[in-house]
Image (cartoon, rainbow, N blue to C red):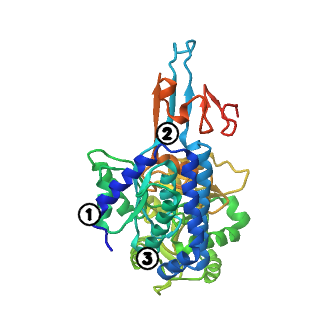
Amino acid sequence: MITTLEQTNEQIAAAHNAYEQAREISPQLRASWLAEVATALETHADELVALGQQETHLDEGRLRFELRRSVFQLRLFMDEIVHGEHLDATIDHADPTWGMGPRPDIRRFSVPLGVVGVFGASNFPFAFSVMGGDSASALAAGCAVVHKIHEGHLRLAIRTGAVVQEALEKAGAPAGLFSTIIGRQAAELLVDHPLVKAVGFTGSTAGGRALFDRASRRPVPIPFYGELGSINPVFVTEQAWSARREQILTGYAASFTMGMGQFCTKPGLLFAPINDADDIADTLRRELDTKQASPLLSPKLREGFDKALDAVRSTPGVDVLVPGDESEAPRPTVLVTTADEVRERPEILEQEMFGPATLVIRYSPGTDLAELAGLLHGQLTATVHAESGEDLARLLSVLRERSGRLLWNAWPTGVTVTYAQQHGGPYPATTATTTSVGTAAIGRFMRPVAYDSFPASQLPEPLRDDNPWRIRRRVDGIWESAAAGMENA
């Protein structure tokens, strides 16, 4: 079942050949391929969900929601590429009166990179796996995909890959446009191979950093879009704590235990003006007792969770507020420390406990929250619970420098797929400044090319004056609508 190096080479070569055949096709035809994949996933939903239940400990509802998300994402990307938003087509006609001197005719649009290697995640067997965000956005960009299967849901991933390949074949896409590989040696070759032009990864900081370094050491380095780890701090102001302490604690308990704490957006730190930790223990125990426990997704994840929990729990100055347990389906653990302790040992704030555990940091009245936020490294999200009239400009400014998505009086778990979404932040949250969720994710796997002073007959379709693809473009500084072609939006 392990993919040999010879097989991996063959699949990458086939993917490159498919990319070359498909890179010039119209957005409408490419969208039809995505449509066929979406329909196939829906058609095989019962079979795929059943496999997911057998391999992941996730319930049917969660798996069906994830699969619906993947299907929705494909269809959202279809609409995006039909309108040509991902191409960023821009035309500057020749202008002898241009302020910098005579301007030549310059036209630019984005083209796909080529073959993309995608590494599936263990914690989302649909949403960040075989036809998750990285694979879907790479195909939408016009790339070919070779997907490295995560063995935490091996049979599900193999079957999903087969469903996708069958759908693309039915749609008329070239053979090799999408394929899957299994095993470490195949994965390493996927990062090393000269025909692979970018990599998408979701997983651990250690594993992602090793692959990122490997991609950077290539004779020709390639982009590595890695989502590695995040602790997602929550800051509660004194006014918010006074006004709705119970509500905040209830929401926090629900958020950090969602999916048994195995979401990359799980809030792992709560900064709150707590005078006596025992005051909140009863509320948290009551809320956590209502949460259904289940085994973690894989033995490897459980091993990592136990190790991380032990490391934080044994740190000087950290106490256990709500003890969990070591059962197969572990009960949630809440640890507690103080702002003074984290000032002395800021490394406390860097340990991600990927599972049902969290750390509460007590701060004293009058504490500068912006100073505490400055101790953090890069994050996917940062949350503030506050009252509308408070002046939090400094805190928000510091958090903006350290996270990709800021939340106000909300919770970070749950990342909707939409146009404005940002799922990515400064290192070590991710290795790039892009997003892996939402329509902007498509742009990761493209690069801009300008055509200077070309005759009309030699221009690619997106840059011709008659706009044969009817995409949205910016012409001489003015945006045109996609539908009208040459009318101003």
Asked whether the beta carbons under mark 1 and mark 2 sit within 8 Å of each other, the answer is: no
Q: Nearer the viewer, residue 5 or 257?
A: 5
Which secondary structure lies at badge 1? helix
Q: Nearer the viewer, residue 460 or 58?
A: 460
Task: Give coordinates of residue 51: x percent, y percent.
Answer: 50, 79
Q: Which residue is mark 2?
A: 110
Q: CA distance from mark 2 to mark 3?
A: 36 Å
> Which residue does the image show at 28% across and 65% down from the upper left?
185
Residue 368 in view of the camera: no
Q: CA distance from mark 3 to mark 1?
A: 21 Å
Q: Earlier in the sequence, mark 1 or mark 2?
A: 1
Q: Amino acid at mark 2?
A: Ser
Q: Earlier in the sequence, mark 3 or mark 1?
A: 1
Which secondary structure lies at badge 2? strand
Which secondary structure lies at badge 3? helix
Q: Residue furthest bottom?
A: 327
Disc 1 residue crowd, few under 14, some 14–19, many 20+, Cα 10 Å: some
Name the disc covering residue 5, or none.
Answer: 1
Q: Earlier in the sequence, mark 2 or mark 3?
A: 2
Asked whether the beta carbons under mark 2 and mark 3 sit within 8 Å of each other, the answer is: no
Q: CA distance from mark 1 to mark 2?
A: 32 Å
Q: Which residue is mark 3?
A: 155
Left or right: 210 in relation to 385? left
> Which residue does the image show at 51% across and 81% down from the upper left?
57
